[in-house]
Amino acid sequence: MSSSVNVVVGVGVIITNKQGQILIGKRSSKHAPYWSIFGGHVDPGESFEACAIREIKEEIGIDINTPTIFGISNNLQTYQQEGKHTVSICMHVEYDGGIAPCNMEKDKCESIIWVLPNELPEPHFEASRNAINLWLTKRFYHPVP
C-alpha cells in the first residue's frame, strides 16, 4: 500500500507552575482559532528533548531544562479533518519562575495564559487536548478506536 501522506512527529510540552496551572497559547496562524500547549515538529536528527527546548525558547522565550516524556498521542482526528497525520511526543517541565514567558511569535500566537488543566478554553487543538488528558489520567497512550 502506497501513500503520499507522511506522518509528522512533533513534541507538545506541558509547562506547569507551582499553582498547578499549565501554559497555553491561542494560535492565530494555520492552527487558528485553537488553544494549545507549546511545541512543534521534530527536525531531522534532533532528539525529542532538544526539540522541546528549542521550540519553547522560540515560542515563549524561556529556557527549560530536562523535559521528560510522559506519553505519546496519535492525532487521527486532525488527519480526518485536515489530511495531516501527526504523532506527538508528550512532554512535561516545571516552570522555574525565572524569566516570564512572553509571546515571541506574534504572527502565530495571539496570547498566552496560565489555566487549570481541567478548565481548558475552547476550541482546543487535538494534540494538546490529548497530551493534557494523558497527563491528567497518568496514562502513556490512549488507543484510538
Image (tube, rainbow, N blue to C red):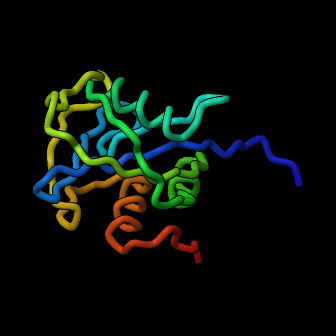
Q: Position of residue 72 (x, y in %)?
A: 53, 59
- Going by the image, does 92 lie left or right of 7? left
In the picture as drawn, the residue positioned furthest to the bottom comes out as 145
Q: Between 62 and 27, which is closer to the camera in this rendering?
A: 62
| Vertical position of residue 72 compared to residue 45: above or below | below
Q: Position of residue 112 (x, y in %)?
A: 18, 38
Q: Position of residue 59 (x, y in %)?
A: 32, 28
Q: Which residue is painted at 40% across and 44% down in the image? A: 67
| Vertical position of residue 54 compared to residue 52: above or below | above
Q: Which residue is painted at 15% across and 43% down in the image? A: 113
In the picture as drawn, the residue positioned furthest to the left comes out as 19
Q: Using the rendered view, name the quadrant where residue 60 is placed.
A: top left
Q: Position of residue 82 (x, y in %)?
A: 54, 48
Q: Which residue is painted at 29% across and 33% down in the image? A: 28
Q: Which residue is painted at 58% across and 36% down in the image? A: 47
- Going by the image, does 133 lie left or right of 83? left
Q: Quadrant of the N terminus?
A: bottom right
Q: Using the rendered view, name the quadrant where residue 29 is placed.
A: top left
Q: Between 130 and 35, which is closer to the camera in this rendering?
A: 130
Q: Between 45 and 28, which is closer to the camera in this rendering?
A: 45
